[in-house]
Image (tube, helix red, strand yellow):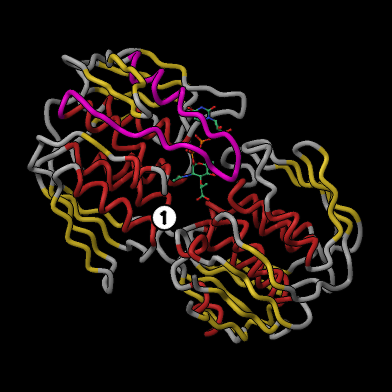
């Protein structure tokens, strides 16, 4: 298993171009199942999760042409006999659950493995199933699989709410079923994360009739058929936020390019409040670090609040704060697996329920640490960049799920970082 080895303390300088958004691409790929014409997606990042979603689509009879160099995916789903998304693939990536809605809408049946456990906590899919049942699907769980069928989906009004607010992939799944349902569907409490908005734009290009895009209420007028389309995905705001936090930790003139600053407002606010200097010009954001970050209270929330997918990285940043910060996790109360590893690097963090109390220390020290999930792994890399001495991040396959060539991008910015195979 590869590991990343970092000699901390090297300042990061220069420009880094941000890749296409993983969380846009994955559900969008499932939209290819809604038509027998070709869906072409550009600015596709080269990631393990994208390869996994390709395999799932192939298992469902789709033809997949992936030009990894150019970042272009050509998907055509004209063999509609297959309806099973197998456990071996689904267990490695929960976003694969998004094939359920399109399969039901177009093929009338689906057999999709339940995703299973996840280190960031319990991640139920009850809202996905509730929404699809409201549209007229009958669903049973048997042998670890969701078995769903319908003799025709019919539009209706659906409220999609959990204790944590809206659901991103749940909204995507129900939306992709509703676009081919008979009549009008209203999805109340819909997610409006930028990635979901991006999916709506792609579906509109395919001929879907969706009103209220970007709001909490999506109104969908079902159509008989969708066509192929070409779509370029938005910039990955989580990758951008990760690099901005790195710049606020140990930058010396670091800029992220090709981003949508509007998608990053909560993150920029946190950086400013902590004393970082920011400059936003068009689709470029530059950051200069504070001496030590001012401590703060930070709570993760659905968009436009601070994203849970940057909580771990923000914690790595505030570990060197000039006082006590409180980080509360409202989306995934158990998403704190990185805390124990940050402690190994000299951080002072106490966890109380879904809150981490971070007592800032002047310096972190390099150590061997273990990555256990995607965003937590990125936090360990950030901590390694600023720590004194050597940090070895083991099991970096987690990071490869969602960051395109992160070690290479950091090396180009001046970090002493290398990937060691084996
Ligand atoms: C998406 O997951 C992202 N994944 C996650 O990113 C991200 O952390 C999450 O949204 C929140 O922003 C992709 O887009 C591929 P949710 P999703 O349904 O849609 C509860 C990453 O690191 N809930 O919006 O699965 C749930 O437990 C990943 O890139 C239910 O109760 O998340 C959580 O508390 C990790 N029942 C809340 O809703 C349901 O049926 C929000 O989860 C569904 C969700």
197 vs 261, left or right, is left
Name the foreground residue: 15 vs 422. 422
Residue at 58% x, 50% y is 309
Q: Position of residue 37 (x, y in %)?
A: 9, 45
Q: Position of residue 209 (x, y in %)?
A: 24, 30
Please tell me in which quadrant of the rendered image residue 146 appears: top left
Residue 317 within the magenta-colored segment of the rendering: no
Residue at 24% x, 14% y is 154
Which residue is most to the right? Answer: 323
Q: Is mark 1 within 8 Å of ligand 1?
A: yes
Q: Position of residue 150 (x, y in %)?
A: 21, 16
Q: Position of residue 40 (x, y in %)?
A: 20, 55
Residue at 38% x, 13% y is 157
In the rendered image of this protein, does residue 71 appear above or below residue 268? below
Name the foreground residue: 229 vs 165. 165
In the rendered image of this protein, does residue 259 appear above or below residue 419? above
393 vs 166, left or right, is right
User: Under tag 1, what secondary structure?
Assistant: helix
Question: Which span is picked out in magenta?
Answer: 107-134
44 vs 154, left or right, is right
Name the foreground residue: 346 vs 317. 346
Look at mark 1 in the image and give the residue it sits on: 22
Residue at 74% x, 57% y is 315
């Amino acid at each position: 298993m590869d590991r990343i080895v970092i000699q901390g303390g090297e300042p990061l300088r220069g420009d880094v171009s941000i890749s296409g958004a993983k969380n846009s691409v994955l559900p969008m790929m499932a939209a290819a199942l809604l038509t027998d014409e070709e869906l072409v997606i550009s600015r596709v990042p080269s990631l393990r999760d994208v390869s996994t979603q390709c395999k799932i689509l192939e298992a469902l009879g789709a033809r997949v042409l992936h030009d990894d160099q150019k970042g272009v995916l050509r998907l055509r789903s004209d063999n509609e006999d297959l309806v099973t998304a197998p456990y071996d693939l689904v267990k490695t990536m929960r976003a694969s659950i998004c094939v359920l809605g399109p399969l039901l809408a177009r093929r009338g049946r689906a057999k999709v493995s339940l995703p299973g456990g996840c280190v960031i906590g319990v991640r139920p899919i009850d809202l996905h199933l509730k929404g699809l049942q409201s549209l007229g699907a009958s669903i049973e769980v048997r042998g670890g699989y969701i078995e769903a069928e319908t003799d025709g989906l019919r539009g209706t009004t659906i409220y999609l709410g959990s204790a944590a607010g809206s659901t991103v992939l749940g909204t995507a799944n129900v939306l992709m079923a509703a676009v081919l349902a008979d009549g009008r569907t209203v999805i109340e409490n819909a997610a409006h994360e930028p990635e979901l908005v991006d999916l709506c734009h792609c579906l509109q290009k395919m001929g879907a009739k969706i009103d209220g895009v970007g709001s909490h209420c999506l109104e969908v007028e079902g159509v008989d058929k969708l066509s192929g389309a070409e779509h370029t995905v938005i910039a990955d705001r989580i990758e951008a936020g990760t690099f901005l936090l790195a710049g606020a930790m140990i930058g010396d003139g670091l800029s992220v390019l090709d981003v949508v600053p509007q998608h990053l407002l909560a993150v920029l606010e946190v950086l400013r409040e902590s004393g970082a200097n920011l400059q936003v010009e068009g689709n470029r954001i530059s950051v200069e670090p504070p001496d030590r970050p001012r401590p703060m209270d930070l709570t993760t929330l659905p968009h436009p609040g601070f994203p849970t997918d940057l909580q771990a990285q923000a914690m790595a940043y505030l570990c060197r704060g000039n006082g006590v910060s409180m980080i509360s996790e409202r989306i995934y109360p158990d998403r704190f697996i990185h805390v124990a590893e940050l402690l190994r690097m000299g951080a002072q963090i106490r966890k109380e329920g879904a809150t981490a109390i971070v007592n800032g220390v002047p310096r972190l020290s390099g150590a061997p640490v273990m990555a256990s999930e995607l965003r937590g792994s990125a936090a360990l890399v950030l901590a390694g960049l600023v720590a004194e001495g050597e940090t070895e991040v083991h099991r970096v396959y987690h990071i490869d799920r969602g960051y395109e060539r992160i070690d290479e991008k950091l090396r180009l910015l001046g970090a002493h970082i290398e990937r060691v195979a084996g």
